[in-house]
């Protein structure tokens, strides 16, 4: 009875949120899914109509409802362009949670989100075992992006090109860090994210190099869990809460001025979602999560707005052109757009050239890429075409998930364009 009462309450809350939608359809023009399929059910207006009748639809065909709600990248383009200010992402996440609770969480997802990801020791062990085994199934594509593919796993993974796991994760290379503030007088907690720790370690190491160069102290314990956004995107709020509480416990043990991450998805989750879901735990957790959110920054935002880093004067002429992709969470959720471009300009070797539709979603969408790879790749091809048309030698992005998507589509097309995080370009020029 309690579960039914809670479900009814959640459905009523959704009704209250949806009422502001005017059905104007402006979301249609910016929705990457609609651009790929031209189906009304794939645009925000169509999904809101589904959510508006969610109780009846769940009873009729809950699996179909789950599938339709899953056909969304959660890029936030619709919300950013909604003239009525409807919090569409909050509605979709809540709807996914309701449907998942009604259907029950897939056993594999349950194991990943509630057992593997909230237990960093177990997750790290799995990755340490998996890294040396890559050579048995994955082979190098020979493209400049350094990707691999696994033809034997095409039925499971799709014909995707992916960067291999790092030979050594960041937490093994660096160990726990707790260094004092240097000349800057600032100390940060550094949250590298799962991809920064296990895949894009060069990006994370570039951040640490920059901190050392500017005299910034670093608190980075071994044992961070996932930020929780993959779990929540799959409708598993319990998984997010478990992972969040592991991280909050570690962060409470440190003293720092800011929490800095190089992953826009992690930054948005910590700033916008942790305070909301911490309320389900207790007032103490909610209070700490809110205070933490207030001092959480993207790495580019930290460099430009806090450290006030400026390019060196009298630098030699640039040699390489870079175009920049606005990651959805970074621009649409956090409003960070000029700062990553400024970071690219800190290294005189590079000149920024803008691509068309720089802020259009690349098609990754986290777990969307896993379950709807064909659509993800179709949307990514449009981004790839814009990158190549810019004539740039490098495309930079402030989110490792976007970097992974960009590497895939560029590698698939055998393009010569490299994929980098803005901080990697800046760190190259530091001694």
Image: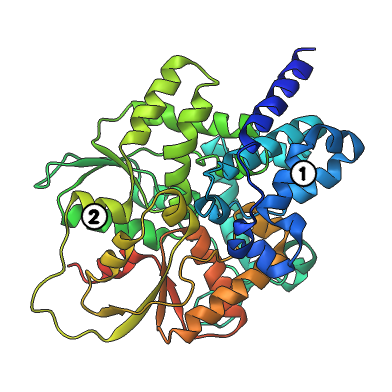
State how the image is colored. rainbow
Give the image location of residue 367, x and y in percent.
Answer: 65, 52
Q: Tell which tag, 2 or 1, sits nearer the viewer.
A: 1
The residue pinned by badge 1 equals: 50
Residue found at x 63% / y 39%: 91
Image-quadrant location for residue 379: bottom right
Give the image location of residue 174, x and y in percent.
Answer: 34, 49
Q: Is residue 354 left or right of residue 80?
A: left
Label 2 or label 1, whichever comes before in sequence order: 1
State yes or no: discs 2 and 1 in contact (Cβ < 8 Å): no
Q: Secondary structure at mark 2?
A: helix
Q: Nearer the viewer, residue 259 or 102?
A: 102
Q: Is residue 359 left or right of residue 230?
A: left
Give the image location of residue 61, x and y in percent.
Answer: 89, 41
Q: Secondary structure at mark 1?
A: helix
Q: Is residue 111 visible?
A: yes
Outermost residue, top direction?
A: 1
Image-quadrant location for residue 6: top right
Q: Is residue 256 left or right of residue 22?
A: left
- 348 to 214, vertically: above or below: below
Disc 2 from disc 1: Cα separation: 43 Å
Q: Nearer the viewer, residue 316 or 122?
A: 316
- 297 to 286, vertically: above or below: below
Give the image location of residue 114, x and y in percent.
Answer: 64, 33
The residue pinned by badge 2 equals: 303
Q: Which quarter of the rendering shows the N terminus?
A: top right
Residue found at x 82% / y 34%: 103
């Amino acid at each position: 009875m309690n579960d039914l009462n809670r479900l009814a309450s959640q459905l009523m809350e959704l009704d209250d949120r949806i009422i502001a939608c005017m059905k104007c359809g402006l979301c249609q023009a910016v929705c990457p899914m609609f651009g790929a399929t031209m189906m009304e059910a794939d645009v925000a207006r169509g999904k809101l109509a589904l959510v508006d009748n969610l109780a009846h639809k769940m009873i009729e065909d809950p699996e179909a409802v789950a599938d339709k709600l899953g056909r969304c990248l959660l890029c936030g383009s619709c919300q950013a362009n909604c003239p009525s200010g409807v919090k569409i992402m909050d509605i979709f996440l809540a709807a996914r949670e309701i449907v998942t609770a009604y259907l029950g969480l897939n056993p594999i997802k349950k194991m990943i989100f509630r057992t593997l990801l909230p237990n960093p020791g177990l997750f790290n062990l799995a990755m340490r075992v998996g890294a040396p085994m890559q050579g048995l199934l994955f082979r190098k594509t020979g493209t400049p992006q350094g990707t691999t593919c696994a033809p034997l796993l095409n039925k499971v993974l799709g014909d995707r090109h992916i960067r291999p796991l790092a030979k050594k994760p960041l937490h093994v290379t660096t160990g726990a860090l707790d260094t004092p503030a240097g000349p800057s007088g600032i100390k940060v907690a550094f949250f590298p994210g799962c991809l920064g720790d296990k895949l894009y370690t060069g990006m994370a190491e570039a951040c640490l190099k920059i901190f050392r160069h500017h005299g910034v102290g670093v608190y980075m314990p071994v044992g961070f869990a996932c930020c929780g956004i993959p779990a929540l995107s799959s409708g598993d709020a319990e998984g997010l809460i478990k992972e969040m509480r592991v991280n909050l416990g570690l962060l409470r043990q440190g003293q720092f001025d800011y929490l800095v991450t190089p992953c826009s998805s992690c930054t948005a989750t910590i700033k916008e979602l942790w305070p909301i879901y911490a309320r389900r735990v207790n007032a103490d957790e909610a209070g700490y999560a809110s205070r933490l959110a207030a001092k959480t920054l993207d790495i580019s935002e930290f460099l430009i707005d806090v450290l006030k880093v400026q390019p060196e004067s009298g630098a030699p002429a640039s040699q390489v052109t870079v175009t920049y992709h606005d990651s959805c969470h970074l621009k649409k959720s956090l409003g960070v757009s000029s700062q990553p471009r400024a970071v690219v300009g800190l290294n005189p070797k590079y000149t920024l050239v803008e691509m068309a539709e720089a802020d259009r979603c690349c098609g990754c969408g986290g777990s969307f890429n896993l379950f709807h790879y064909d659509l993800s790749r179709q949307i990514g091809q449009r981004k790839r075409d814009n990158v190549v048309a810019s004539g740039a030698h490098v495309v930079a992005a402030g989110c490792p998930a976007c970097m992974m998507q960009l590497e895939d589509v560029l590698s698939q097309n055998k393009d010569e364009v490299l994929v980098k995080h803005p901080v990697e370009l800046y760190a190259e020029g530091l001694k």
